[in-house]
Amino acid sequence: MITRRAYIVLLFTTVLVLSACGRDRRHRARHHLTTETEVISSSLNGNGEEVTSATELWSEEEFELLAPAMPGYVPSQILERLGYITSYNNDTKCPNWVAWHLTKERTDGPFPRKGVPYYDENGTAIGIGDVTPETQRGDYFLDLESEEPRQLLTDWPNNEYRMTHGHICPAADNRWSKAAMNQSFLLTNMCPQDGSLNGGAWQKLEDKCRTWAIQFSDIYIVSGPIYSGGKVSRTIGSSKVAVPDAFFKVVLCLEGTPKAIGFLYKNGPSSQSIKDCVYSVDIVEELTGFDFFTSLPDDIEDVVESDANLAKWN
């Protein structure tokens, strides 16, 4: 079990790496995010209709709330999908973060994960396009829109650390659409994740988030990997896909009195309960170097991001 003391040690190590530019770093991060990062949209919407611009997938208001500001030196390619937005890093071959707006209506649906993709009558993977054995294996897809170098399907089988495909935006949050379900299996939504964490404590947190979306009508979620000291110590596959040391998740609710909460989980076997992994969003920001929910008014952002009171969510 990783203790709070251990996370504080990790915090200070990471801050030493990420804090070189102080306050200017955050200013540049916002500029980088909104004007210098390539934005690519999925080619199909939930009805299978062509989408020609990013704004047809995510409104500017949603994008500005969900997408965190980042240090300008972090490689980032923004990929917008039906169910989420991801910032892909072609150094780590993993997402920097994945963000989504989970509504009550999207917590369930008629299109569950089934082990194989959803196809249309022409044999095309819905929301993905035509696939080949090199671009699709089981229900996982190579993301051909991601910048090279990228994760490959061959990086995963029999990997050295026996890591599993860790969805950052869960498949279960995308059961409302065949296209959204398929897109949740793009490798740009995956990080190598310990199997017992993936199917245990992390899954319980995903279930809890769906409970909150039902309880409060909707929530905003940002999640992704953490590397101790800001450095990659382990990789898998010939593409050298980075293995995170930990994972973060921050959740925002604007229903009633706004509130936010953060979570940190070590990427390893874990029997920790959700309450053992609660941190303020401020702590998660210090660990990641990201600035979350920047479109909130400053007075609201300062209050909600300093809080770590799980009781407010029950």
Image (cartoon, helix red, strand yellow):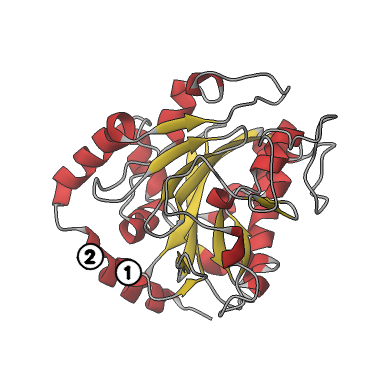
Mark 2: which secondary structure? helix
Nearer the viewer's eye, disc 2 or disc 1? 1
* Horizontal and vertical percent position of residue 253: 54, 38
Total marks placed: 2
Question: Circle 2: is it few (<14), some (14-19), or many (20+) Cα within 10 Å?
Answer: few
How much space separates mark 2 and mark 1, taking CA atoms? Answer: 9 Å
185 left or right of 37?
right
- Identified by mark 2, the residue type is Val
In percent of the image, x 77 and y 45: which residue is there? 117
At label 1, counting other C-alpha atoms closer than 10 Å, the crowd grade (few under 14, some 14-19, many 20 or more) is: some
Name the residue at 72% across, 23% down: 48
* Quadrant assignment, res 176: top right
Q: Is 87 located above or below residue 286 in the figure?
A: above
Q: Is residue 34 in sight in this rendering?
A: yes
- Residue 122 position in % (x across, y down): 82, 30
Residue at x-position 41% and y-position 60%: 92
Amino acid under disc 1: Lys
Q: State whether residue 13 is above or below residue 34.
A: below
Residue where numbered disc 2 is placed: 17
Q: Are marks 2 and 1 in contact (CB under 8 Å)?
A: yes
| Image position, residue 186 (x, y; %) | 61, 47
Above/below status of 9 relative to 193:
below
Mark 1, residue position: 231
